[in-house]
Amino acid sequence: MDYIAFGRTLIAQYPQSRTIRGRGLEDNLWVKQAVPPKARIWHLLQKIIAICVPNPMLRATVSNGGGNALRMEATRLQEFRAKGFHAPEVLAFNDEMLILTHLGPQLRDALDQMKDAEQRLAVMKIATAELARLHNAGLAHGRPYLRDMTWDGDKIGFLDLEENPVDVMPLAFAQARDVWVFLSAASRFARVSQQENVYSPDTIFALLAEYRRHAGAAALPELAKFVHTMRPVRYLLERRWLWDRVGSDVRQSVFVTQCLEVCFDGGKIG
């Protein structure tokens, strides 16, 4: 099959879509278009913060876009697969598009469908162990949100490797940031029932313990340093007059930072 020709047909039909699912007999593949650089005002602010706060985890890793970004992602996907991780197969790519196989539902969507909290936690532990295995192989994801992982009922898969954090920070820092980002995303399922802005730490404690069981020690000391560096920001954002006004992503990150402080300072980990 001429995947590039098929991709151009899909792009012509859906020019505004960044990623397009194949249609008909080809619904097991995705076409990903090249896009302009993703840098926004937040990324400029992040760069300024990174200059003021000397922790590499705060460095921006935004994709530069264009054909080079597609080629870089294709290379990273191939590396993940070569090292035994469940990632999309690269069927074809050029400066216009990247064509990939379909892995299955997003992990976040799969967890949303689960009504049993113990089942959700069990699957999140599988994802945590797989992230630890990724780190043990000398890799970092870059942005392991639940929407950038998949779960087909058997395997955790890794998607959207557009941003390579080791381009701007040492591997241990990139892996530490992976853990922080993943736990922040997982805290979506740590909310206390019927209370949007209230979270229970038990889920985060369990996932962090799972990571520690499976991963080497390189990331945890850097994660502890980062948590302590962010303590003044956490103190500010957890004030009630801000807590109920910031977005859920910020609340979840602050909550996870609180949990990590308890773990590191209380001697539970590290």
Image (spheres, helix red, strand yellow):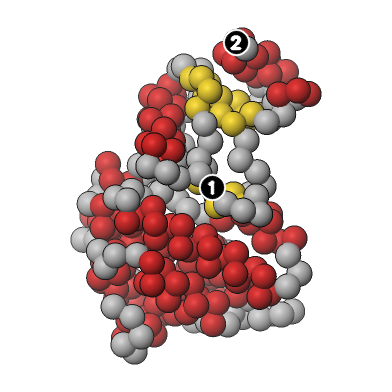
The residue closer to the viewer here, 50 or 41, is 50
**Looking at the image, which residue is at 65% across and 43% down?**
104
**Looking at the image, which residue is at 27% across and 41% down?**
167
CA gap between label 1 and label 2 equals 26 Å
Element assignment for label 1:
strand
* Residue 133: numbered disc: none
- Compared to residue 136, the image places residue 105 above or below, namely above
Name the quadrant of the C terminus.
bottom left
Q: Quadrant of residue 12?
A: top right
**Looking at the image, which residue is at 55% across and 77% down?**
203
Residue located farthest toward the bottom when viewing the structure as drawn: 266
* Mark 1 lies on residue: 157
Residue 142, position in %: x, y?
40, 49
Residue 198, position in %: x, y?
61, 80
Specify few, some or many for label 2: CA neighbours under 10 Å numbering under 14, 14-19, or 20 or more. few
Q: Quadrant of residue 269?
A: bottom left
Residue 36 visible in the shown view: yes
Side of 225 where 12 appears, left or right: right
Amino acid type, label 2: Asp
Element assignment for label 2:
loop
* Mark 2 lies on residue: 2
Side of 52 where 105 appears, left or right: right
The residue closer to the viewer here, 105 or 148, is 105
Amino acid type, label 1: Gly
Name the quadrant of the N terminus.
top right
Residue 37, position in %: x, y?
44, 32
